[in-house]
Each structure stands twice: as structure tokens, then as C-alpha cells.
């Protein structure tokens, strides 16, 4: 069995597969080079299929969207759609993890930068070549803990897993009625 982590990106998608014991089986960054549009999306899907098919993936996690990001949001949505559709077609149950939750899980701080994420991954036994692989590693660890029910080491990790398992339900605000002759 394996657990999958995907740090989806237009320029460098990180992939990580963990084995049943939680150790790294595969760590890679998909670099589309000069590919754009459908060719780039196809490459990401092909690499994802190549790693997941036949690996016995029991669960996965992918980085959710940074909603305050500016720029190529439609292209990022396309990458996210390809990742989600591919996982669905393969029958892999996967959760979306907010970027701040991922950073908190890895380092204890929701504001950790890329270098801190790499150091945290190295501390936990991975050898990431870049921050995309470090993010994918921690996403795979989240999938591992969710699927196996094993307990993580830190309070921050427990809090993140609890929030993923028990998302807050937003209640719609009551709309105020206009009062005639109020002023």
C-alpha cells in the first residue's frame, strides 16, 4: 500500500509516495519545461498515472488553492481539475489541504517559508530536491495519518488532522431587511 501527496503547480508539481511504514518510496518534481496549455496538463496527468497505477495507493492529499493568490488563477484551476479528475478515475480518495494547514502540519507555523519546509522534510526523513517535493512529502504524510489512523507526533499535526476530518460548516448570514423611514 502507498499514500500519495501532490503539490500541484503550473511549473513544478511535486509528487510523493509513502509506503505502509511511512517511508518515502518515490519523490519527484514534474517539470513541464516549455509546455503550455493542454500539453502541460497532459504531462502532469501522464506522470501522475505512471506513479499511481499499480502502486496500491490507499489515500492521497493535494494542496488546495491559495485563494488570496493573484495571477494565473484559471490555469491553476485547470491543473487542480486534472489532478482531481485523475485521482477520481483511479479510485483514489484524496483530500484538499489548505496551504496554511500544510505549513502548520509541517512546521507548527502557518507562515513557514520554502526553506523551512525543506528543512522540516529533511528532519522527518525525506530528501527533497526542492520545496515542491517537501510540500508533497507532508501532503503524503497527512494522507498516511488519515488513512491509517496512526497518531502524529506534534500538537500542530493533531490539530490540522482534526480540522481536515471535522471541517467547520459555514452558516449563511441572515440578510438584514430594509426598514422604511429609518432615518
Image: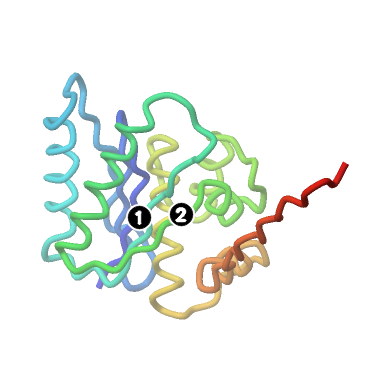
Rate crowding at label 1 as few (under 14), some (14 to 19) or many (20 or more) other CA atoms within 10 Å: many
Please name the residue that numbered disc 2 is placed on.
138
Nearest the viewer among 149 and 61 is 61
CA gap, disc 2 and disc 1: 7 Å
Sequence-wise, the earlier of marks 2 and 1 is: 1
Tell me: 124 left or right of 170.
left
Q: Position of residue 78 (x, y in %)?
A: 26, 39
Q: Position of residue 181 (x, y in %)?
A: 82, 46
Please say if 103 is above or below 160.
above
Name the residue located 29 percent from the left edge and 58 percent from the top edge: 17
Tell me: 174 left or right of 144.
right
Quarter where residue 87 is shown: bottom left
Among all residues in the image, which is located at the extreme top? 34
Name the residue located 12 percent from the left edge and 52 percent from the top edge: 50
Where disc 1 sits, the SS reads strand
Tell me: 160 left or right of 56.
right
Q: Decide: marks 2, 1 in contact (CB < 8 A)?
A: yes
Quarter where residue 61 is shown: bottom left
Q: Which mark is residue 5?
A: 1
Name the residue located 67 percent from the left edge and 61 percent from the top edge: 174
Q: Position of residue 19 (x, y in %)?
A: 31, 67
Image quarter (top left, top right, bottom left or bottom right) of the C terminus = top right
Image quarter (top left, top right, bottom left or bottom right) of the N terminus = bottom left
Q: Position of residue 175 (x, y in %)?
A: 66, 56
Amino acid at each position: 500500500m502507498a499514500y500519495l501527496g501532490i503539490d500541484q503547480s503550473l511549473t513544478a508539481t511535486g509528487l510523493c509516495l509513502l509506503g505502509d511504514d511511512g517511508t518515502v518510496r518515490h519523490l519527484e518534481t514534474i517539470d513541464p519545461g516549455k509546455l503550455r496549455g493542454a500539453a502541460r496538463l497532459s504531462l502532469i496527468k501522464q506522470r501522475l498515472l505512471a506513479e499511481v497505477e499499480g502502486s496500491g495507493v490507499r489515500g492521497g492529499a493535494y494542496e488546495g488553492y491559495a485563494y488570496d493568490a493573484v495571477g494565473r488563477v484559471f490555469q491553476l484551476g485547470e491543473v487542480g481539475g486534472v489532478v482531481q479528475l485523475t485521482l477520481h478515475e483511479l479510485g483514489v480518495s484524496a483530500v484538499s489541504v489548505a496551504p496554511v494547514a500544510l505549513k502548520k502540519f509541517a512546521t507548527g507555523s502557518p507562515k513557514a517559508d520554502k526553506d523551512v519546509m525543506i528543512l522540516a522534510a529533511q528532519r522527518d526523513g525525506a530528501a527533497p530536491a526542492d520545496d515542491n517535493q517537501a510540500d508533497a512529502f507532508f501532503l503524503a504524510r497527512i494522507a498516511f495519518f488519515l488513512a491509517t489512523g496512526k497518531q502524529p507526533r506534534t500538537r500542530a499535526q493533531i490539530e490540522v488532522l482534526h480540522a481536515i476530518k471535522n471541517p467547520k460548516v459555514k452558516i449563511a448570514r441572515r440578510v438584514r431587511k430594509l426598514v422604511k423611514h429609518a432615518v
